[in-house]
Image: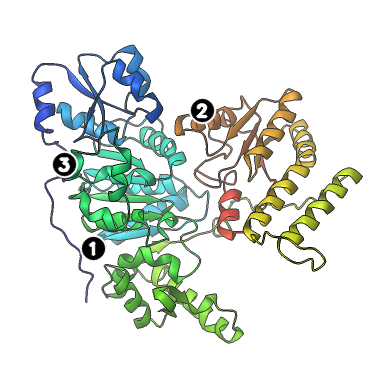
Amino acid sequence: MPLATSRSRPTLRLTSRLQPGPASARTLNSAGGRTFVLEIPFGLRAVAQGAGAVWNASVKAFVYHGMHLPRSLEPFRSEPYSWERLKEDELSGVEPIPRTPERDVQLRDHQKKAVAVVRGALKAGRTGFLNADDVGLGKTIETWAAALEMDDAETVLIVCPLAVVAHWRRTIQWMGDRGKRIVVINYDRLKKLFEVPAEIASRTGPRRRKKTRKVRTAKGIARYGEAYSFDLIIWDESHKLRNVEAARSKMSLRLNAEADFVMWLSATAGQNPLELAYLAPLLAERTGARASDLKDYEKWCQMQGIGVVRGAYGKWLWRGDTKDPKQREPAQEDLEKMRAILFDGSVPAGIRRSPTDIAGWPEINRILLPVALDPQDRAMYGKLWDEFRSELGLELSRKSNSRNGLVARLRFRQKASLLRTAATVDLARELLDQGLQVAISVAFKETLSIIQEALGKDGYPVAEIHGEMTGPIKERQRLGFQQGRAPVCVYTVEEGISLHEGEYNDAKRVNCIHDLRWSAIQMKQIEGRTHRDG
């Protein structure tokens, strides 16, 4: 039976010609000028209010009405393709104007092939596609090139991590938008796309933030009311939806149900069938079944012979997670079945290629470098190791009240990271002397600060990227490295930033991974920060 999806269009559906905004906004516009929807950090709301910005409950943002935006509010102006710009144009009655490409972006042969595969899926009447190309092959360019060919996709939603928003915005500007109404938003702001019912909106102003938590949980999603509907939805880094019980995953199901076509992008889509549950509609459509929710996905797995079951207390289990060696062979068969469903056939449901599949692609050259500690650091390391074992209860001769292994493990990793900073700084100096640009991946901000300070004293400008920065600041730091103003970039993020060579200069890059991660997915993402194409 074919996949059943809802195709009803709610009143909040976007079109290329936007409907008039709320009555309150129309009253303001009748007096002349336009309505500016502002992006104001919570800590600066008082400053914005003093400059004339007012809270609009229906828009869920601060707005300013007038002929021109005051200089004091200019820093809060909405960015192109943002949710705020969407609401601003809607309230002011502004229609999208086609943006001509700022650059002549030429697709490589493997990227053209990806666009052709998406085109084939559309012709076959499919409603979704998974782009699982390996890190750095240019999934963003492939996907947007395919989207530009979709004439019927007048409205496009792109959901991505915060650090990737600027990258998507820049790619669209470089390649043009053909007049599509586009919203680029990060995963944490998905709730903005749901219309809050009047009885809730009346009590969720900026000074009543705690009240809104009731509608942020997974159970409370239904209370948001209708959601905006888009012709095309793109989920970048879609592995963010692996936790199907999370609110963002449940919101994604509601948004996908109203879209004509959905594209998921991830080089690390999932490591086992449990982590691919968010692709249930795509998998079911590929096999002629139905799987519109999680219960359907469990039944679908059983129909395909995939070892996914419900364990104690309703927890999902996959036989590949067991340590029983007898289960290893059927677990591997499960993975092969999932790969075949997604990527095999004349009209596959997705595409998956690694750099080794593409002629002329340079292989990653991994060099493991041992770290030699001086006697003082060696003694310190030994002390840390003893403390770590003691915390885990591995030293029977010692008594410890704390058995929190996770805390002990994190503390040990952090201190060991700090001990190795001198070796990494020395390596970076050597690489810089060879004329290379150096990207250094660390797990802890304290480590980042030590490496940055040491290289800074040597006269090397250092860009830094970490989770405490806002999106625009991260992008400025990234561009400093990409354009060569800073030959070094030290970063803690594991995905969502592109540090590849060739974007602005041809300086060769080296990626030094100071702190190895235990997750294969995280390591794959980190390696792809510099080993990229497109």
Separation of marks 2 and 3 at Cα, in angstroms = 33 Å
Query: As displayed, is residue 144 above or below residue 99?
Result: below
Q: Nearer the viewer, residue 1 or 395?
A: 395
**In the image, what residue occupies the spot 12% across and 22% down?**
28
Q: Are marks 3 and 1 in contact (CB under 8 Å)?
A: no
Q: The disc labelled 1 sits on which kind of residue?
A: Gly
Separation of marks 3 and 1 at Cα, in angstroms = 22 Å
Q: Name the front one of labels 2 and 3.
A: 2
Q: Is residue 105 left or right of residue 322?
A: left
Which type of secondary structure does the marked residue at label 1 adopt?
Answer: loop
In the rendered image, residue 267, in percent from the top left (x then y), is placed at 49, 56
Which type of secondary structure does the marked residue at label 2 adopt?
Answer: helix
Of the 4 image quadrants, the one containing the N terminus is bottom left
Query: As displayed, is residue 280 above or below residue 35?
Result: below
Q: Nearer the viewer, residue 285 or 311?
A: 311
Q: Is residue 309 left or right of residue 411?
A: left
Going by the picture, which residue comes out furthest to the bottom?
326
Is any part of residue 95 visible from this angle? no
In the rendered image, residue 109, in percent from the top left (x then y), is placed at 46, 50
Q: Is residue 245 left or right of residue 255?
A: right
Q: The disc labelled 3 sits on which kind of residue?
A: Thr
Which type of secondary structure does the marked residue at label 3 adopt?
Answer: loop
Identify the mark nearer the N-term, 3 or 1. 3
- Which of the 4 image quadrants contains residue 446? top right
In the rendered image, residue 504, in percent from the top left (x then y), is placed at 54, 30
Q: Which mark is residue 476?
A: 2
Question: Which residue, given by chain and number where applicable, does mark 1 sit on?
Answer: 125
Q: The disc labelled 2 sits on which kind of residue?
A: Arg
Query: As displayed, is residue 256 above or below residue 342?
Result: above
Question: Which residue, given by chain and number where applicable, does mark 3 sit on?
Answer: 15
